[in-house]
């Protein structure tokens, strides 16, 4: 078990080093978030001065969803067949998929928090229950990361990666978005925690199911 944890830690450190070496990828994601928020500000806030809370919430999650897709899609596609074969000889497939999910979750959390701060500064803060909304961002980031990482691993074995990712991720992302929207709406309205236990439990269950499926099925995909 200790050796397995060391393997995951080494793979996560490798992902961080590669991301730090290719700073243009992270900088591109930050530029995408800031520019998208600015466009929303110019289109909504600047013209009418008052934006409806439901519109505020919808725009924010659209930005986060596309940020997740753009940042996590490259998890496997940026690695050639030679590098994947090299990983195959050094690490277990479970270690590889878990390390990528952890790294993508950390990356998504950083992008989500920074995006939320920029969004609040430009668009105002109509959130009534901020701690609940932050929990919603946490669960959404974990859900997007686990789902899109698993789908990226499957799509990397095909030629048309982007199309396959859209088809495979839609059935999983859709119920997750429904729960996220409902939970964030409760936070926007300032409702208490007791009204959102069901949504939180469902989101945790979806994340756990996707993580378990990734852990169990990725070794078969990796061997191909």
Image (cartoon, rainbow, N blue to C red):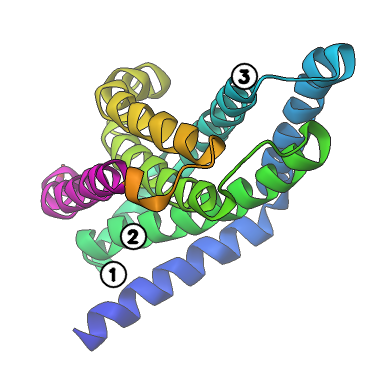
User: In the figure, is residue 161 to the left or right of 71?
Assistant: left
- Seen in the picture, residue 186 relative to 44 is either above or below; the reply is below
Task: Determine if the magenta segment contains residue 207.
Answer: yes
51 falls in the magenta region: no
As drawn, the label of residue 55 is 3
Q: CA distance from mark 1 to mark 3?
A: 48 Å
Residue 76 location in percent, x, y? 40, 43
Q: Secondary structure at mark 3?
A: helix
Task: Report the residue that reaches farthest toward the bottom.
Answer: 2
Identify residue for label 1.
90
SS at mark 1 in the image: helix
Q: Earlier in the sequence, mark 1 or mark 3?
A: 3
Dot 3 crowding, Cα within 10 Å, few <14, some 14–19, many 20+ = few
Rendering coords of residue 31 (x, y %): 76, 37
Q: Answer with left or right where residue 82 lies relative to residue 211.
A: right
Could you tell me if the residues under marks 2 and 1 are in contact, i.e. CB atoms within 8 Å?
A: yes
**Residue 191 x %, y %:** 47, 42
Whether 82 is drawn above or below 152: the answer is below
**Cα–Cα span, label 2 and label 1:** 7 Å
- State which quadrant residue 179 falls in: top left
Q: Which residue is at the front of the view, 213 or 97? A: 213
Q: Which residue is mark 2?
A: 86
Gap between marks 2 and 3 measured at Cα = 47 Å
Q: Quadrant of the C terminus?
A: top left
Closer to viewer: mark 2 or mark 3: 3
Identified at 20% across, 48% down, the residue is: 205
- Seen in the picture, residue 93 relative to 164 is either above or below; the reply is below
What residue range appears in magenta? Answer: 197-223
Instruction: Please identify, in this view, whether the residue under mark 1 or under mark 3 is nearer the observer.
Output: 3
Viewer-nearest residue: 168 or 163: 168
In the rendered view of the protein, which quadrant contains the N terminus? bottom left
């Amino acid at each position: 078990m200790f050796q397995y944890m060391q393997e995951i830690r080494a793979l996560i450190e490798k992902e961080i080093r590669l991301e730090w070496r290719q700073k243009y990828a992270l900088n591109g994601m930050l530029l995408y978030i800031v520019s998208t928020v600015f466009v929303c500000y110019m289109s909504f806030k600047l013209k009418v001065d008052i934006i409806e809370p439901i519109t505020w919430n919808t725009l924010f999650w659209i930005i986060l969803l596309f940020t997740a897709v753009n940042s996590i899609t490259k998890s496997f596609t940026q690695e050639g067949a030679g590098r994947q074969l090299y990983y195959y000889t050094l690490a277990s497939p479970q270690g590889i998929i878990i390390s990528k999910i952890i790294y993508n979750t950390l990356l998504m959390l950083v992008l989500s928090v920074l995006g939320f701060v920029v969004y609040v500064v430009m668009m105002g803060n109509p959130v009534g229950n901020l701690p609940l909304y932050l929990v919603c961002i946490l669960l959404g980031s974990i859900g997007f990361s686990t789902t899109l990482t698993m789908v990226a691993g499957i799509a990397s074995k095909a030629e048309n990666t982007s199309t396959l990712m859209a088809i495979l991720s839609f059935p999983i992302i859709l119920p997750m978005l429904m729960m996220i929207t409902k939970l964030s709406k409760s936070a926007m309205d300032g409702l208490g925690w007791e009204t959102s236990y069901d949504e939180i439990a469902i989101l945790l269950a979806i994340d756990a199911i996707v993580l378990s499926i990734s852990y169990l099925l990725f070794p078969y995909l990796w061997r191909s």
